[in-house]
């Protein structure tokens, strides 16, 4: 159990950035009710922290997708494990993502969420690894941090389903 983890973003850095993102969101959505849709499992802590800065009429839902690694058509290789339960029609949907890597998950989700006819659709992602991008993506409206091409853990993000509960974001040292 002597795993070495190098801190990439401290709990304090994350907290500061989450508050800044929430302030931007509150300004942009003034007078509108938001439906936050978080992607399980990775976004659970980010959504929990972000949501506590948003107005009391904010609604919360989750979805879960997984990729099954068909390299010939990566976008269609994303599949639903759990659909949102709230009707998204005419809602101001803000998709809350933990990390955008190749971008295939986000490309798939934007397309899917549009088919539910929301009043508006934007994305709030905590992390982005732009150097890994494969999909052709619309810009991410609210982004926490751009990070280098390293596999990160903590604050919701896992390696083999562990480390999600770390209060900071780190890189596993091998
Ligand atoms: P994409 O479809 O390649 O953009 O993949 C996004 C998903 O891959 C994320 O929601 C994570 O589940 C996973 N992922 C990508 N990079 C990392 C990482 O550095 N740490 C943990 N999970 C990651
Ligand atoms: Mg995710």
Image: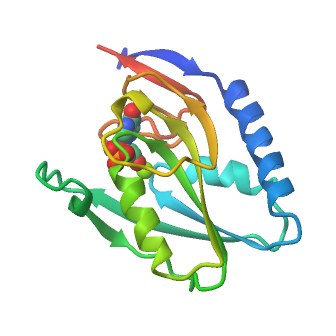
Front residue (pair 102, 58): 102
Task: Name the residue rendered at 29%, 39% in the picture.
Answer: 160
Residue name at image x 77 percent, y 54 percent: 25
Work out which quarter of the rendered image holds the N terminus and state it: top left
What colour scheme was applied to this rendering of the protein? Answer: rainbow
- Is residue 162 visible in the rendered structure shown here? no
Report ligand 1 position as a quadrant: top left
Residue 29 place in picture, x, y as percent: 80, 63
Q: Nearer the viewer, residue 130 or 163?
A: 130
Report the side of 91 relative to 151 (left or right): right
Res. 74 visible in picture: yes
Give coordinates of residue 22: x percent, y percent: 78, 48
Answer above or below: position of 73 versus 130: below
**Which residue is at the front of the view, 3 or 92?**
92
Against 38, is 115 above or below? below
Q: Position of residue 38 (x, y in %)?
A: 54, 60
x and y percent of residue 20 in the render?
79, 39
Left or right side of 142 for 155: left
Q: State the residue at coordinates (36%, 54%).
A: 105
Counting labels gives: 0
- Give the quadrant of the C terminus: top left
Q: Is residue 134 left or right of residue 95?
A: left
Q: Nearer the viewer, residue 20 or 141?
A: 141
Q: Residue at x 43, y 21 (%)?
A: 171
Q: In which quadrant of the rendered view does residue 91 lie?
A: bottom right
């Amino acid at each position: 159990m002597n795993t070495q983890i190098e801190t990439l973003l401290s709990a304090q850095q994350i907290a500061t950035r989450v508050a800044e993102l929430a302030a931007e969101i509150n300004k942009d959505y003034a007078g509108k009710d938001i439906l936050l849709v978080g992607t399980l499992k990775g976004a659970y802590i980010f959504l929990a922290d972000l949501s506590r800065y948003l107005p009391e009429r904010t609604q919360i839902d989750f979805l879960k997708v997984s990729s099954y690694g068909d390299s010939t058509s990566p976008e269609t290789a994303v599949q639903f494990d759990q659909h949102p339960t709230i009707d998204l029609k005419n809602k101001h949907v803000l998709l809350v993502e933990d990390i955008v890597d190749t971008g295939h998950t986000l490309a798939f989700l934007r397309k899917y969420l549009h088919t539910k006819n929301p009043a508006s659709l934007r994305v709030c992602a905590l992390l982005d690894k732009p150097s890994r991008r494969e999909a052709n993506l619309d810009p991410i409206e609210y982004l926490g941090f751009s990070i280098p091409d390293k596999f990160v853990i903590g604050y919701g993000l896992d390696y083999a389903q562990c480390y999600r509960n770390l209060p900071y974001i780190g890189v596993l040292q091998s």
